[in-house]
Image (cartoon, rainbow, N blue to C red):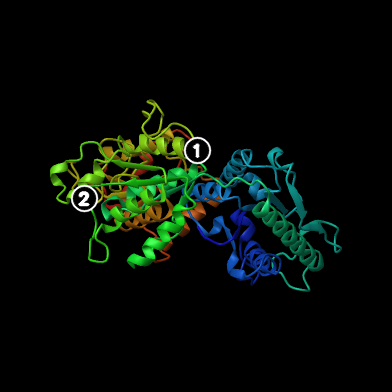
Amino acid sequence: MSDAKYSVFVSYAHATNQTGFGVSRGWVSQFVDNLKSELPQRLGRPEWINVWSDGELEGKDVVNEAIREAVSRGQALILIHCKSYEESKWCMAEMTTFHELLTARPPGKWVFLVEFEKYERHAKLIPYAGYQFWGPDPKDEKPRPFCYPMVRPEAFGFDDYVRLVIRLSEDIAEELKRLATAPGAVPPPTALVAETTDDLARVREGVRSYLRQQGVRTLPDIPYPRDPDAFRAAVSKDLTQATLFVQLLGPYPGVKSLELPEGYPGLQAKLAAAAGAPVLQWHKPGLDFTEVDDPDHLKLLQGPAVVVEGIEEFKARVVRQVKGGAPAGAPAPTGTGLESPAGADEELSFGVGAEAVPVGEESTHPAAGPRLFVHADRPNDPAVEAVAAALRGRHCDLLTPAYGTPPAAYRSSLNSGLQASAGLVLVCDPTDADWTAAQLKEYQRALRQPALPPVLTVDRRAPFDPTSLGPFLDQLGGPRP
């Protein structure tokens, strides 16, 4: 996420941004470019403003996390509404996320609805301000989008298009400035999640992701500088904004030097204590203190603010405390229903059965078949388990993305899984063309080539027929039943 002073998120159906007719950039991309040109004139320098869209992210889990982050930071939201938007399950899921999260925000003009074409709004969209970017074409009086497919002076509705972009920019700027200067505005709960040693980096990102999904802002916005003095200054600055200092500890103290005798974990804890910040620290159950050679680090591990429990319980504890709930020492509730997402705290593996084979390990099957990458639009759908069971019955090794992890971790799992696999299996609703197109685009990016390995699409809405796997496995040279 950008640390710009103002930020605007654009949600749209990919069908609205298709290229063609000799146009190299779709309508939405041109619209966003125009908005980026107009907003700085009303909000200040260009680097203060970040206009971004879900087209910059692939994967539903990644996008939903980004939406929650956007709402938690009080950003403006633009929905480009059209028939394709209403018919896309992915877009409607985004819209539902907006609606649910915005009900908890203070009153304000948070959502700006750009009407790309004439189409009846969903009931949840009726309250939002609308900007009609369509009108009757004088050639035949049929309603058409302004400046489609290309924004240029001779295009239909160009003057109206320019007028609306300017008006939208003015309204967004006014609202963002009002929110930034509103008297009595309450800053969002904020947790400084301390940087960790490398062995805990992935767990830390899982904690940050969970907190953002719960409406908690996380610091730092960007990694701290490595220079010790600059590191101290950056941490001290963030501590002035933090409601809670959160630190994950392991057996290692990190690199120490004459300039940094405490190591980075020890220095962050020292700065938090000096600032008088509330502190909540964690290490995993069963940590063997005999492995800890550094006496100062051992003292840190045994400090009064350290909680020893499962990471999911700790995440819930952090949310309660940062939002003003139970104190750090209060016992965590049981039965929260929070489960680790597949691959969040483990090596990349297919998390729907005990026979999942992680990357880098040998298969336990007597005759291992091809390794396959399985991706689902709904990972917990029963159809996913049915497909996985059938593939395991044919001795296939299975991999899947690390669902629910932050964008960097998710993409890393996607890249490593695709590169290690001989074929792809998509378990999804094949009528949702936006989702399928986004996944294929991401696969091509991960593999750095337009050609993909063999792909099998399984319709999760229909009863699964295991015999349908035969022709697909034949392409891969896999065993038949």
Q: Quadrant of residue 142?
A: bottom right
Give the labeled residue for mark 2.
296
Closer to the camera: disc 1 or disc 2? 2
The relative height of residue 330 versus residue 367 in the rendered view (above or below) is: above
The answer to whether 418 appears left or right of 210 in the picture is: left
The answer to whether 323 appears left or right of 283 in the picture is: right
| Residue type indicated by callout 2 | Asp
Find out whether the residues at labels 1 and 2 contact each other: C-beta distance under 8 Å. Answer: no
- Name the one closer to the observer, 122 or 71: 71
Lower sequence index among marks 1 and 2: 2
The relative height of residue 212 versus residue 44 in the rendered view (above or below) is: above
The relative height of residue 102 versus residue 434 in the rendered view (above or below) is: above
- For label 2, the SS is helix
| Residue type indicated by callout 1 | Lys
- Name the one closer to the observer, 103 or 331: 331
Residue 435's label in the rendered image is: none
How far across and how far down the image is residue 68, in percent? 53, 46
Which residue corresponds to the image point at 74% horizontal and 57% vertical from the top-left? Answer: 171
Residue 454 shows in this picture: no
- Name the one closer to the observer, 53 or 224: 224
Give the labeled residue for mark 1.
323
- Name the one closer to the observer, 221 or 258: 258
- For label 1, the SS is loop
Report how many numbered discs are placed on residues in the image: 2
Which residue corresponds to the image point at 48% horizontal and 35% vertical from the top-left? Answer: 462
How far across and how far down the image is residue 166, in percent? 76, 64
